Amino acid sequence: MSQSEYRAAARRDVTPGTDVYDTMTGQPIAQLHDLSSNGLRMSGSQLLKIEALYQLSFHLDEVKGDDGQRGSPIQCAAQVLWVRADGVSGLYVTGLRIILMNTQVVESIEAWAKRNPQREH
């Protein structure tokens, strides 16, 4: 997927305080900032390695999770595309590409994001 195709997906800011968990450790690793059907942006104190793969889990009240219910856990496999240090907060802001996610969850995220898409920064 090219950078222009990746950015073409509607994305939307999420409710502040949405934790993202590393499913391998069960530990929260970041706070989710925005989400599309093919990527996400998050920030946390942990520096993630570019190109590394992660198994992530989070939930959003307005999006159907893996069991088809709104607000239930969403799991995905994602690859780190970029990381930058936020000089103000001291956190690492990370962009990831979603490489594997339940098809029904993808459709739910697409519908949710299109209802109120985020403007480009």
Image (spheres, helix red, strand yellow):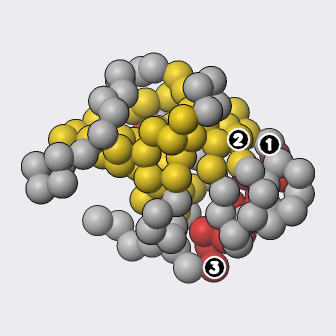
Q: Is residue 42 visible?
A: yes
Give the tally of numbered discs.
Answer: 3
Residue 66 percent location from the top left of the image? 82, 48
- Image depth: mark 3 or mark 1 in front: 1
Q: Quadrant of residue 76?
A: top right
User: Secondary structure beneath disc 2?
Assistant: strand
- Image depth: mark 2 or mark 3 in front: 2
* Residue at the farthest left position: 87
Q: Which mark is residue 18?
A: none
User: Secondary structure beneath disc 3?
Assistant: helix
| Three-letter residue code for mark 3 | Arg
Marks 2 and 1, the one that precedes in the sequence: 2
Residue under label 2, please give it.
Answer: 75
Q: Quadrant of residue 121?
A: bottom left
Side of 55 where 4 appears, left or right: left
Residue 113 percent location from the top left of the image? 60, 68
| Three-letter residue code for mark 1 | Asn
Identify the residue at image location x=66%, y=57%.
Answer: 59
Side of 20 where 50 appears, left or right: left
* Residue at the farthest bottom position: 116
Q: Mark 2 and mark 3: span between their CA atoms?
A: 22 Å
Residue under label 3, please give it.
Answer: 115
71 in relation to 28, above or below: below
Q: Is residue 34 visible?
A: no
Residue under label 1, please give it.
Answer: 102
Residue 4 percent location from the top left of the image? 43, 47
Is the C-beta separation of discs 2 and 3 under 8 Å?
A: no
Identify the residue at image location x=53%, y=46%.
Answer: 20
| Three-letter residue code for mark 2 | Gln
Q: Mark 2 and mark 1: span between their CA atoms?
A: 8 Å
Marks 3 and 1, the one that precedes in the sequence: 1
